[in-house]
Image (cartoon, rainbow, N blue to C red):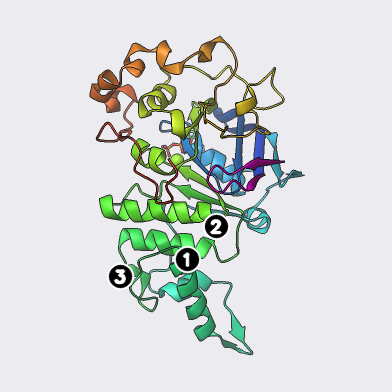
């Protein structure tokens, strides 16, 4: 199944489709009937309040939590992801928030840990170092030396090392859980650039974030989860942070809508088989009366000023969802794409 990449015009293939995913932890329904998909060369942001089910959904993909219900297709084939090894074999790499780097080892050793290149009986340090530099250059990464322990690197540089390490096996899908949560402004910009490089390399990228500015800066599509259910899918080109926050907080309820082609007459743009980004990208809307215009459902959501002034942490039950600080919600893309 193919669609066109908005920037390159090349066909873009669906990599991964999740349908009707359910996951319980005892009495807690962490996920109910969740649909999700990602194409190659696409950055999909997964957003939602604390406890919305974001981490659980990506842990299903990472083979940490096998789902209780639903199906997963990879390259159009049904698959079962029962273990982290299964996920890795398929080409799904997850960078969890703790990064899991070995602090005392240098950058090269961290990248190749467990997959070391050998020259006969000895490690081929020269080859590993050269390939490390090649990969870091491709990512436009700012790492001064690959022979320093990663403990001495900044938070952004450590994130870079973790991302570079995930690329050694040439995965199809890269999942990042809150990659900028602990970073300052400059380091956040570096990681966002890195995510754009991942898209250019053709990886499907899933980005979990509470930061709406980051999401709007780098994602192509945003999937909102609320209380373990889908609550909206939006093309970033046409969505505002106010609309996203309305979906995140439940000011608009899309949870009754169907999200995939198996549902009753889904809108073409929201169906997994359809282009996520039409020629003139429109907001991807779920079917049904609830979705005429999410902003219209809530006056605060329709009025950016009102939403900007709203006490966000109260609205979201304690989560601080960071908003862009200015009216302009997208930074210019380096590739000239809007
Ligand atoms: N291993 C587990 N055992 C029991 N309950 C769990 C487990 N993991 C998650 N949950 C519950 O599942 C629900 C979804 O949690 P999840 O961590 O997926 O949310 P999240 O969207 O990632 O939230 P946050 O933004 O806080 O990271 C929550 O109610 C959580 O308490
Ligand atoms: Mg989480």
Q: Mark 3 — residue?
A: 152
Residue at the location (69% across, 18% down)?
265
The answer to whether 317 appears left or right of 279 in the picture is: left
Work out whether mark 1 precedes mark 2 in sequence or the reverse, and give the earlier one.
Answer: 1
Q: Mark 1 — residue?
A: 138
Residue 201 visible in the picture: yes
Query: How far is mark 3 from mark 2, CA to CA?
Result: 28 Å
Query: How far is mark 1 from mark 3, CA to CA?
Result: 23 Å
Looking at the rendering, the quadrant in which ligand 2 lies is: top left
Is label 1 in contact with label 2 (beta carbons under 8 Å)?
yes
State the quadrant of the N terminus.
top right
Q: Where is residue 200? Give x, y as percent.
A: 52, 54
Q: Where is residue 268? Give x, y as percent.
A: 65, 25
Under 8 Å from ligand 2: the CB of mark 1?
Answer: no
**10 Å crowding of disc 3: few (<14), some (14-19), many (20+):** few
State the quadrant of the C terminus.
top left
Q: Where is residue 264? Give x, y as percent.
A: 70, 17
Q: Mark 2 — residue?
A: 201
């Amino acid at each position: 199944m193919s669609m066109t990449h908005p920037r390159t015009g090349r066909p873009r293939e669906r990599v991964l489709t999740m349908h009707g995913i359910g996951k319980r932890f005892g009495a807690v329904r962490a996920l109910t009937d969740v649909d999700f998909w990602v194409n190659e060369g696409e950055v999909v942001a997964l957003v939602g309040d604390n406890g919305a089910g974001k981490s659980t959904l990506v842990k299903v993909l990472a083979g940490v939590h096998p789902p209780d219900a639903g199906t997963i297709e990879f390259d159009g084939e049904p698959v079962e992801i029962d273990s982290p090894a299964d996920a890795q074999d398929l080409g799904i790499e997850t960078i969890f928030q703790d990064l899991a780097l070995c602090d005392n080892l240098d950058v090269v050793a961290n990248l190749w840990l467990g997959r070391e290149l050998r020259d006969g009986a000895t490690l081929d340090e020269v080859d590993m170092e050269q390939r490390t530099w090649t990969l870091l250059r491709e990512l436009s990464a700012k790492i001064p030396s690959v022979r320093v322990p990663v403990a001495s690197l900044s938070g952004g540089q450590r994130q870079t090392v973790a991302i570079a390490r995930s690329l050694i096996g040439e995965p199809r899908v890269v999942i990042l859980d809150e990659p900028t949560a602990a970073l300052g402004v400059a380091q956040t910009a570096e990681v966002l650039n890195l995510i754009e490089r991942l898209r250019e390399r053709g990886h499907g990228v899933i980005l979990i974030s509470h930061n709406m500015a980051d999401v709007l800066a780098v994602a192509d599509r945003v999937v909102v989860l609320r209380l373990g259910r889908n609550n909206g899918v939006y093309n970033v080109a046409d969505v505002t942070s106010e609309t996203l926050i309305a979906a995140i907080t439940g000011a608009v309820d899309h949870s009754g809508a169907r999200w995939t082609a198996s549902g009753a007459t889904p809108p073409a743009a929201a169906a997994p088989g359809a282009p996520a980004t039409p020629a003139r990208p429109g907001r991807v809307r779920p079917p049904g009366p609830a979705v005429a215009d999410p902003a219209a459902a809530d006056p605060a959501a329709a009025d950016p000023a009102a939403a900007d002034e709203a006490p966000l942490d109260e609205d979201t039950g304690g989560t601080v969802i960071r908003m862009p600080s200015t009216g302009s919600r997208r930074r210019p893309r380096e590739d000239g794409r809007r």
